[in-house]
Image (tube, rainbow, N blue to C red):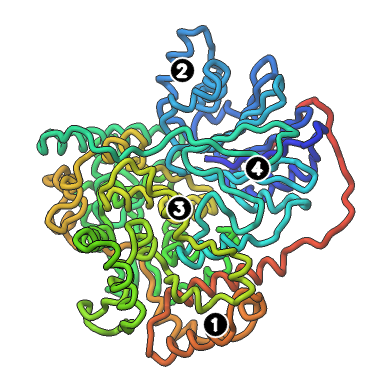
């Protein structure tokens, strides 16, 4: 786990070494063990290393002997030994046992097609000095991040985090209106956009190739999840195969030359991972958990039971109900607005884990693979109702009901029908976008100013969902919802949250449930193996019966939650009021001030629960404040080129 960055100049000149160093320094937390820089004509590459494998070799950027290819890389290739054996048969020799050398040799031998042989998490850049061309590649599920953009001078800049690019003084910091719409709808900026216009995330499963003079770079997809149903295996065979496949994925991720452990929440996914680790390890697995003072949010008792069952070396940290002092820290950690409030406990659990390990395995991905979220079940129910009513009737009738029916936040669940009526008026992708929206579209419409709506030019985030959905390879509404999550929620929220929170503490997190072969196998399973009689994760739970207690396997999911509604009527009341009634949100020109004021008043009085909406707006306000404070003033800069000779600087 590391950080990479680079500059490819648009006119073939040498990159500015001082700027490249500043970009690399901005991501020092990603690699405290070593920092290097290499300059080639037309390109400068830099790297920060967190040593996991082979501490005596593997320095980056790494180049082939003839100097043609230079690599800077973030991630882990879990099948590197298998690839090494294949390359050795082809005549290659290896100086160490680091997967960086494996990746460089694989590119040297197979070129861009080597990506199809990689099993792991990665983002990397390869400079081809002969063709004066840069190649950027991101792993299939988007576990590792990679940003890129063009400067006004036509230079391509890229890096592992947005802050690395923002350290370049010539890159525009103009805001991207579509990113603000996406953020307010979803709580994160969905890829390929970033919060800044002209700066992009390389999407999961994509790569790009660019040379000076080619204009704006264009990414291409090299892998996708296929939800086309396969031949349904026998249920008992599928149960055994699931266990064996996940065991293989876990074992591959336990290779490290540094202390290794796991997050243990007490839920099905992390408990399953820990149980498999315990079966593969010679020593007690190091586990850590976060507990909450408020019992409604606390799962630490379940985590403790699994730790006792598998005799792990367990650590626990309790979070009080007012642990909101991290708000400004999170703005710096995530670089752009990020409204998943579970980033608070995630940051804390990473902080706790780093005290005893450098690598931790997590249970992320189980809900997406095996239909674990409650919203999948609701979407399935709505889809059945939607299928029975012709579209020409459904849209106008339920559209009117959705507009007229009051939003009853405090009423019994069966009376809270507004969202359901609205969803029934929509098609599958639109309805799913509606169901996952933190700030519903009708509320966003009242929040936005007329001038901002004009800037959006009619764009709404549902357009992204309707563009993605046809690629799912299935007409099953639940499979489409899963596919949409793999393309939006998983890389944009879950994996971003964990990568930045873990890397802020120089901690590597590995996700066996997102092994791409395991994901592909799970995607082809029948829906009935995932969702049965209203119970999600059916096959996953069956495969761990006898390994985990039934009351843990079949209890209601909680997840990392924080009491936002109570915070904004209690300890964060003044903070929330200030954010919505004055300051950057009001002054931005994006929002209608009277609507912001009314939204706050409705929540503060108890008439409505706008806790999630206010949190999203607060994080956006804090982002605006940070931007105003850190935006560099234009200034003349001394240009310091470096000759072709590689330069290195060690920490």
Mark nearer the N terminus (3 vs 4): 4
Which circle, 1 or 4, is nearer the viewer? 4
Asked whether the viewer can see residue 354, the reply is: no
The quarter of the rendered structure image containing the C terminus is top right
Q: How far apart, in angstroms, are the residues tagged by discs 1 and 2?
A: 56 Å
Residue that mark 1 sits on: 575
Q: How far apart, in angstroms, are the residues tagged by discs 4 and 2?
A: 29 Å
Q: Is residue 584 left or right of residue 114?
A: right
- Contact? badges 3 and 2 (CB < 8 Å): no
Q: Measuring 77% from the left and 37% from the top, which residue is drawn there?
A: 10
Q: Measuring 62% from the left and 84% from the top, which residue is drawn there?
A: 582
Q: Measuring 48% from the left and 60% from the top, which residue is drawn there?
A: 461
Q: How far apart, in angstroms, are the residues tagged by discs 1 and 3?
A: 26 Å
Q: Does 96 appear above or below 43?
A: above
Residue that mark 3 sits on: 498
x, y percent for residue 76: 47, 34
Residue that mark 2 sits on: 84
- Nearest the eye: 452 or 30: 452
Q: Is residue 429 left or right of residue 304?
A: right
Mark nearer the N terminus (1 vs 3): 3
Mark nearer the N terminus (1 vs 4): 4
Quarter residue 71 falls in: top right
């Amino acid at each position: 786990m590391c950080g990479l960055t680079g500059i490819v100049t648009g006119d073939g000149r040498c990159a500015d070494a001082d700027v490249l160093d500043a970009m690399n320094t901005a991501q020092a937390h990603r690699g405290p063990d070593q920092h290097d820089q290499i300059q080639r004509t037309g390109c400068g590459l830099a790297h920060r290393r967190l040593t996991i494998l082979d501490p005596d070799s593997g320095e980056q950027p790494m180049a082939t002997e003839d100097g043609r290819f230079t690599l800077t890389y973030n991630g882990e290739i879990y099948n590197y030994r298998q690839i090494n054996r294949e390359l050795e048969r082809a005549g290659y020799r290896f100086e160490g046992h680091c997967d960086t050398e494996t990746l460089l040799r694989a590119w040297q031998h197979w070129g861009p097609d080597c990506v199809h042989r990689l099993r792991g998490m990665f983002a990397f850049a390869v400079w081809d000095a002969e063709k004066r061309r840069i190649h950027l590649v991101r792993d299939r599920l988007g576990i590792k991040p990679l940003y890129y953009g063009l400067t006004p001078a036509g230079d391509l800049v890229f890096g592992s985090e947005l802050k690395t690019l923002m350290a370049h003084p010539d890159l525009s910091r103009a805001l991207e209106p579509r990113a603000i719409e996406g953020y307010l709808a979803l709580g994160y900026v969905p890829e390929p956009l970033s919060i800044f216009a002209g700066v992009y995330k390389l999407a999961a499963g994509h790569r790009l190739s660019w040379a000076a003079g080619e204009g704006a770079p264009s990414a291409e997809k090299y892998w996708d999840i296929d939800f086309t149903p396969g031949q349904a295996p026998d249920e008992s065979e599928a149960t055994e195969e699931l266990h064996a496949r996940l065991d293989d994925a876990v074992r591959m991720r336990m290779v490290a030359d540094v202390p290794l452990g796991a997050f243990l929440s007490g839920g099905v996914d992390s408990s399953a991972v820990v149980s498999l680790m315990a079966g593969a390890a010679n020593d007690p697995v190091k586990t850590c958990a976060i507990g909450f003072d408020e019992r409604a949010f606390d799962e630490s008792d379940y985590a403790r039971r699994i730790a006792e069952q598998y005799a792990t070396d367990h650590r626990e940290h309790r979070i009080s109900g007012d642990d909101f002092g991290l708000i400004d820290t999170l703005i710096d950690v995530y670089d752009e607005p990020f409204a998943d409030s579970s980033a608070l406990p995630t940051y804390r659990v990473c902080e706790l884990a780093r005290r005893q390990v450098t690598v931790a395995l997590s249970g992320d991905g189980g809900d997406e693979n095996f239909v674990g979220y409650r919203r999948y079940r609701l979407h399935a129910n709505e889809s059945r109702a939607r299928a029975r009513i012709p579209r020409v009737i459904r849209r106008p009738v339920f559209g009117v009901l959705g507009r007229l029916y009051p939003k009853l936040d405090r009423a019994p669940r069966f009376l809270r029908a507004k969202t359901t009526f609205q969803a029934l008026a929509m098609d599958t992708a639109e309805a799913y976008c509606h169901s996952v929206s933190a700030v519903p579209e009708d509320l966003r419409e009242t929040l936005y100013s007329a001038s901002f709506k004009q800037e959006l030019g009619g764009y709404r985030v549902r357009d992204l969902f309707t563009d993605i959905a046809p690629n799912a390879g299935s007409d099953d509404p639940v499979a489409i919802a899963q596919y949409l999550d793999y393309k939006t929620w998983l890389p944009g929220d879950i994996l971003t949250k964990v990568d930045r929170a873990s890397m802020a503490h120089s901690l590597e997190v590995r996700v066996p449930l997102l092994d791409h072969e395991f994901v592909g196998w799970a995607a082809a399973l029948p829906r009935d193996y995932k969702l049965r009689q209203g119970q999600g994760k059916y096959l996953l739970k069956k495969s761990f019966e006898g390994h985990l207690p039934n009351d843990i396997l079949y209890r209601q999911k909680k997840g990392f939650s924080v009491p936002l509604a109570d915070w904004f009527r209690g300890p964060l009341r003044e903070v929330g009021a200030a954010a919505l009634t004055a300051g950057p949100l009001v002054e931005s020109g994006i929002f209608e001030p009277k609507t912001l004021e009314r939204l706050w008043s409705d929540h503060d009085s108890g008439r409505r629960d706008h806790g999630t909406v206010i949190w999203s707006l607060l994080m956006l306000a804090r982002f605006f404040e940070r931007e105003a404070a850190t935006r560099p003033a234009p200034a003349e800069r001394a240009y310091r080129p470096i000759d072709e000779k590689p330069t290195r600087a060690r920490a």
